[in-house]
Amino acid sequence: MVTLLKDSVSKSRKPLAMLRSRLYRLKKRASDKGWFKSAVPVSFPFERGAPDASSVVEAKKNYQHSNITQKDETFVLYRIIGNDLVPRHAKGQSRQNLAFILDHEPELPGCEKRFVVNRLVDSEEERAIIGMLEAAGMPYLHIPFSWEDYRATSWDVGGVPSEYAPYSRGYSRLSDSEKRRVVMRLFRFKNNYVMNNNGARNAALQDGKKLAKWVLPWDGNCFVTSAAWQDIVRDVTARPECPYFIVPMARMTDNDALLAEEERPVAIEEPQLIFRSDSQEGFDPECYYGRRPKVELFWRLGIPGVWDKWAIEPWDLPCPEYSQEAGVYAKAGWVARLFSGQAHLENTPKGVVDRGVARNDAIAGLLEHLDEQAFQAHYQASNTCFIGSPSTMQRSFSNDQALYSTLREAAETALGRGPYSVVDKKTLPPSNNSHDYWHPAPYYWPNPIPIPGLPYWPRDGKRVPGTRLYEPMSDNYDRMRLQRLFDDTFVLALAGSATANGRFDVHAAQLIRRWFLDPESAMSPHLEYAQVRQGWNRNRGSSSGLIEAKDFYYFLDAVRLLEQRGALSASESAAFREWLAQYLHWLRTSPQGVRERASLNNHGTYYDLQVGAIAAFLGEGKLLRHTLLDSRCRIVQQFAADGAQPEELKRTTTAHYCCFNLQGWIHLAQLAESCGEDLWGFEGPQGQSLRKAMEWLLPFMGKAWPYQQIDDFDTERFYPLYHAYREHYGIPPGLEHIEVPAKAAIKPLFFPHDGIRPFWQRY
């Protein structure tokens, strides 16, 4: 009867689960399509009200009394040729449209034509375009692309509020289009360098104001017919007191149509601008391509349009105030915009939205490609991230006999332990599968008062028996064995490098085989039963359990050393990477992994360290770069301007967690440094940085800790932090007269819970 009841309940749950799954997919699709109103707080430009009308009268008066009235009605037209953005444009479309302009555009009376070749990253395309201009005798400004300058260009981390950082829960709730816009804001500085949209316009303005009364700094795909030019000149010369003119655009899907004399397409698209040479306003170089760089000037000048109802989102640049010249503009003629090569993105009802999506995807794709090229110049997956090569290790330890002796002793001890496996534990996980990693939540104790739904209750800082490493009962679970695996493999690999003794490599390789490769003993590639609270979450683990595998970062350096010395066969290395790839996928996609990535304290730090180290080992360069981007966002979120760690100061063991978190940051900075990235020098908008964090913490060395710390605390944990600071920044301020032991005099082995890797001195 009980069995039948269970089967009935199980069957009834399946349709409900399917319904929930379908509702989730429908809700996500609706959100991504923009069917629901966004919960993101926004403002709108129209909320500013109308500009001051007196500026129009003042402008007319000023013009009548200025020297500009003596200038002839001369014009200079610039076309800015930038990078083709596939799939927004067809590849080579800018060059094709330039050829059409050079072959078919008529002479424009009273107007000099010039071009701007703007930071083309494709050197072959750049040479072809410059060759065409020179062959046609067309003058041009050349703004070159520089790899050195691009590599020095950072992310705009401070532009995205922490609640919408890519790792955050707030970001996960955004629609796909909103997520794209957050990513575009993070790319802003790189976008501004490569696309240089407003920078090139301003360069044309500056050059053109010396040449003519009227300057037209236009997009490279603009084409002017004879009829359009007559209309522009007529309208401008009729109202020369206006320092600005808007010229509406007509999007073309067939360039040849412009060759018919009677052709006059409907011009209703976002206009181009004409500037009088004494105009005061220019384009804001802070505004980035794909997010209203020209419209920002419309807002300042009070030029009305649909853009007044475009939302200003929390990650946008703020809407500007009106200029003193607001309202002082007129309309002049029209201009054609040549075909982009993508007809479905032009004159269609969905064109504006689809163009925006394609534009953002294309910019992100280009910048990702450039980032990959820049990154690969400094990164190689086979290189160790935290220690040197075997030959470096051998020289390093031979120069420090005390450290060498300690390493040799630790390695000999490790030879007598293991190999380890998850199947050796004395209790089973809730899955009853011995291959699944299993460990109870360390700070959740059985509730002495039986309350339905609350069988356990938290005691922060007080560990449940068996959850502290190496204590009685820890053999019941897998945490101790995992730590032994990490530490012993690492120590043995170091000893193999320092001594050239093959015994150490042989045993280290056997540790890897039994834990990861042997089907009878291998661990399942997940942590679904890490830090389980019985009776909660269907007896699955919690997101915080992922931190128990935090030390993959130095373990993987040990694997690299063993592979370099041939201790693992090619097939074994491939099998290990397959296991690691499956585990990485679980880390990134499981509910536990997604929640851990969104953690605001040390768990987020060590999530980045674990994912970043595995990505570096597997050659996942894009994931590694984006993980280090997450880390920059975390620095802004985790540290106060003075360097304090508010999240860690909420705990009952604050000295431990402040040191533990900062130690994780040191390892992340070392990982970044190993592939040419810099976290040591990163600063947030309020000065948040690793340097400030160390300067806040280190002055507590040798003093009473003023915050809650209910456990014993090893004060020597300050020493590795001190030496990391000194190696990167010099002597910490205020500690010039404090005596700190040299690195060689400090113990090389700390308790694993402290977050300091074995033989930390060898970096």
Image: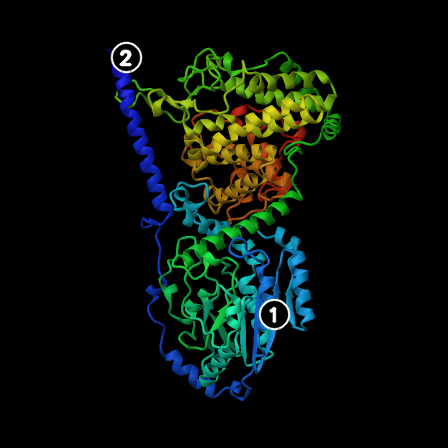
Q: On the image, numbered disc 2 is attached to which residue?
A: 3
Between marks 2 and 1, how big is the CA–CA gap?
81 Å
Q: Residue at x 60, y 13 (%)?
A: 417
Colour pattern of the rendering? rainbow
Q: Can the viewer see residue 714?
A: no
* Above or below, comparing residue 151 to residue 565 in the picture: below
In front of the other: 123 or 335: 335
Residue 369 percent coordinates (x, y): 59, 48
In front of the other: 758 or 337: 337
Residue 533 percent coordinates (x, y): 37, 22
* Above or below, comparing residue 371 to residue 9 in the picture: below
In front of the other: 467 or 28: 28
Query: Is the residue marked by circle 1 packed among few (<14), some (14-19), or many (20+) residues within 10 Å?
Result: many
Inspect the image, locate mark 2, and give the three-letter code of the amino acid beneath it. Thr
Residue 115 image label: 1
In front of the other: 707 or 223: 223
